[in-house]
Image: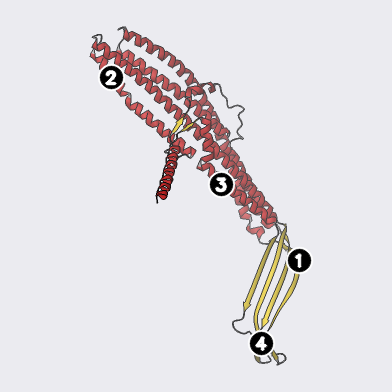
Amino acid sequence: MKLLQKTGLTIATFALSINISAQDSAQQPLNLTFDEALEIALSDNPTVKVAEKEITKVDYSQKSAWYGLIPNIEASGQYAKYMMPATMSLAGMVIELPTDFNATGTLQATLPLFAPALWKNIQMTALDMKLAVEKAHASKITLRNDVTKAFYNILLAQDAYNTLQEGYALAEENYSQAKKRFELGLSAEYDAISAEVQMKNQQPALLEAENGIEQVKLYLKLLMGVESTTPLTVEGKLSSYENRISQNNSADGLPTNGNSDLKQLAIQKLQLKKALALQQTQRMPTLAAFAQYSYAGTGNKAGMSFLTGEYSPAITSWFSQGLQAGLQLNIPLTGIFTNTAKEKQTAIQIQQLDIQQDYLKNSVIIQIQTAIDNMNKSAKQVEASKSNVQRAQKGFEIASKRYENGAGTVIELQSAATSLTQSRLAYNQAIALYLSAESDLEKVLGE
């Protein structure tokens, strides 16, 4: 009994340690760079998984179409037992036949020799595979764009929170300085009250920025296919991406043939052309080779023979009907007229796709130019805001010295601190806008 108790205690302790270890592992935060976040998203995102399943499904459909070229072998059998005796009329007499059952077994093989519809169908499934692959590629491009923007939004939110914290620290320092000067009788009480109000007014913005970080992190977790309760930290700052910013970008020479939407539309156009060719094959003859072997049997009950009038025992006979081989030719006669309307409908659909293709190409060119314009505008904003940060920093230092020496007012000091915070926020915002526009350009180009 003591041994059992010790064993049970050991097992319980081991299970508890495993449970605690699993909980610690589940709560272990993810510390991600951009490349790591993108890698996880491309492997675990449900949209990508669905697209990959679609490729597998279409692959089976393609294999099924090729199976049509393999000889088709069918076996059939039939057994019929007479529940009531068969009768026949002979010389004014009705005679019951002693037949008990009939049975037939057939084995048939068919091989298509000339089947245009079959080949067109195989070509259609090849296009289906191509379209499925391109859709999967498009889903990855879209996912990359979403992950990129989500990642940069987290960096923007984190940098904004840090900037607001720095601004709060400046406001706190201003309040401490104003309060000290008031206590020494060097300034009015208004200065201390005004500095305190400005400091406390920044607390809601800090809370909002902190909540914004969690919101954008939840979106990134959703894109990555990660549980929403998993702690997540993101490495990096937007300022580290400043070296990627360049101006004078131009749409000249940028290819549009990499755009996934244009590629899908081109494949859909080929599908319609193949569908039209498939409909036209309904007018063509088909030729197939076949071979057939049959085996039949019959059974008779015991009784008087109506031919000899003598008693005949029960008999079961089996015999072969021989092996047949030949060619089967099918020539459609009415199909020439019945498929004409369908072919005209498909031809109109092809014309509609031509119009959509031209419209989409123009739209892609506009999207490329818009993304480049946004990049150029953001690049100029980054340059201007960076210069503003330097001037605002210098202005705050001057205002701080002036107030410290009694030459300036608390209003000047507060205004300088606010300008410094706003210029830092504008600088990070400009970098984020540039990176977002750059990601949009890559998406449109199909990169």
CB under 8 Å between discs 3 and 2: no
Residue at image location 55% in from the left, 44% down from the top: 51
Which numbered disc, 3 or 4, marks the residue closer to the eye? 4
Q: Secondary structure at mark 1?
A: strand
Which numbered disc, 4 or 2, marks the residue closer to the eye? 4
Circle on res. 209: none
Q: Quadrant of residue 25?
A: top left
Q: Amino acid at mark 4?
A: Ala
> On the image, numbered disc 3 is attached to which residue?
53
Residue 447: image location, x then y, percent: 58, 33
Q: Quadrant of residue 200?
A: top left
Q: Nearer the viewer, residue 346 or 428?
A: 428
Earlier residue among tags 4 and 2? 2
Residue at mark 3 to residue at mark 4: CA–CA distance: 64 Å
> On the image, numbered disc 1 is attached to which residue?
325
Residue at mark 1 to residue at mark 4: CA–CA distance: 38 Å
Asked if residue 275 is positioned above or below residue 157 in the image, the reply reads: below
> On the image, numbered disc 2 is attached to which residue?
196
Residue at mark 1 to residue at mark 3: CA–CA distance: 43 Å
Earlier residue among tags 2 and 1? 2
